[in-house]
Amino acid sequence: MTHPTKYIFVTGGVISSLGKGIISASLARLLQARGYKVTIQKFDPYINVDPGSLNPYEHGECYVTTDGVEADLDLGHYERFLSIETTRANSVTTGHIYMSVIDKERRGEYLGKTIQVIPHITNEIKQRIQILGNTGKYDIIITEIGGTVGDIESVPHIEAVRQLKWELGYKNSIVVHLGLIPYLAAAGELKTKPIQHSVKNLMSSGVQPDVLVCRTEHHLPQGIKDKLALFCNVRKEAVIENMDAETIYDVPMHMLEEQLDKVVLEDLGLPCPDKLDMDKWEDFLYRHKNPKSEVNVALVGKYVSLHDAYKSIVESFVHAGAACETKVNVHWIYSGDVKADTASEILGGMDAILVGPGSGERGTDGKIEAARYARENGIPFLGICLGMQMAVVEFARNVLGYKDAHSVEIVRNTAHPVIDLMDSAKSVSSKGGTTRLGSWPCEVKEGSLAYEVYGSKEIAERHRHRYELSSEYLPEIEKAGMVATGVNKETGLVDIVEIPSHPWYMAVQFHPEYRSKVEAPHPLFVHFIEAAKKHSESK
């Protein structure tokens, strides 16, 4: 492409949680299918530097990029839809912006000037928006502005968009605005006033949307589309219906039917090639919607009341299920409910058990019991991060006989600390961004289940943890039958353990769910679901 990098800004109005991330990812996937090089970045208006220390109940899953950034869960959608890897440049918060500006002020880079939102904060936002575009790697950059138009936190970001649209020039940027069209059952009507007020609010900040994406539970009559086009100053073709979909993976196809990609390319002055590469996506959808078998998988965790806390794991099940032509019924099980006398009742009907990540003491006893039940009853088991650590604790207690074995995270003075704080974390007091983060290499033992899963001796997976399996106890653990089959050679940290005598038992310190994609499901989840199928068939 010979054109300058084009920018698409995605804003939201009326209410939050309308799906800006899914719309951004869907549009990006369609543009990618037309042959354009596309990436997406998220600008979050909250003042936290990152979501790493946020409560999962408040913010959902904390996603981790390859280069070790704790980021919003929408980056997971970007990666899953586009089969790309995001970096620190794809995730920016107001905390990042203010920290950078204040650091520059302390270094004297502003030459004694008074630091203000305009121009200093907005200039920093604009500079961050253009980092990816300045690499020359992309034809189009999609920037999702978090929050809702009208929020006081979003004002500097909207102002930065206004300035940047003017600076970039004609046909080099557009604004896609997502809003809600509610349906009043009592009146039997779709109401357009909320989205009109949202657009008015955006325009009062000097930003005119070019495309309206209308979230709705019902089809929009042409008359309503025409009304919105007239009163919101957009082309009739640029009023896009975004009706509730069966799955998030239907949204790109719905947007294709609405010609969102064509409208956007026209507004950017770019050609819309006839060739559309969505064959793999459509094959995935067919497999997902036409399973030949089904399995029941227990997801045991402490945050199960908010499903977004385990978003990447659930989507990995979707990807693996499609690959195996199997419907994966996820059973959300609060780990605090799993006890010695309830485990059989709660987990007895499961074809596989996954003990998920987390932190803190609450619910850990239930994770230990779930690991015990899976081990003793030959049920396929996968432990992730804290799930691996509790599996090791369970093994130390019930196989090695160390009844008081635990993680020092939970019991600091335990007599048998089979899970200990990493050496690199022992002198660190700060909580934010100080865990072992990002992609780390791991050497897999040949002949192991892990080697069968990956088909390679050298792998790399993403981490987010402070605690590890203690090397002091590893010889005893291995002698008793739980084997370390994946180790980081540089640090000596154990990344994978498994029990060879068990039909399928593996626990990993890393987060494989971060690498699963729609068109490239993670092999660990695929293998896990295949094991669940075999267990189901054997019952």
Image (cartoon, helix red, strand yellow):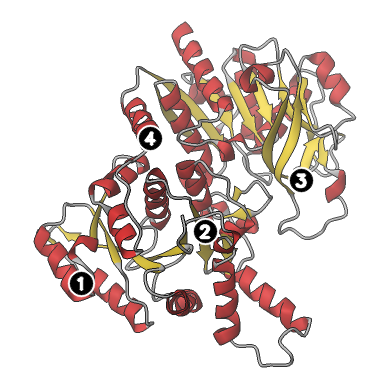
Residue at the limit of the structure toward the bottom, as seen here: 113
Q: Is residue 218 visible?
A: yes
* Tag shown at residue 222: none
As drawn, 469 above or below 33: above
Instruction: Name the mark nearer the viewer: 3 or 4.
Output: 4
Q: Position of residue 275 (x, y in %)?
A: 33, 41
Residue pointed to by mark 1: 193
**Toward the viewer: 208 or 292?**
208
**Toward the viewer: 498 or 228?**
228
The kind of secondary structure element at disc 3 is loop
The kind of secondary structure element at disc 4 is helix
Residue for point 61% across, 83% down? 120
Residue pointed to by mark 2: 41
Disc nearer the start of the sequence (3/2):
2
The kind of secondary structure element at disc 1 is helix
Disc nearer the start of the sequence (1/3):
1
Callout 2 amino acid:
Gln
Callout 4 amino acid:
Trp
Instruction: Name the mark nearer the viewer: 1 or 4.
Output: 4
Could you give the CA–CA distance between mark 2 and mark 1, rounded to whole angstroms? 30 Å
Residue pointed to by mark 3: 466
Label 4 Cα crowd, 10 Å radius (few <14 / some 14-19 / many 20+): some
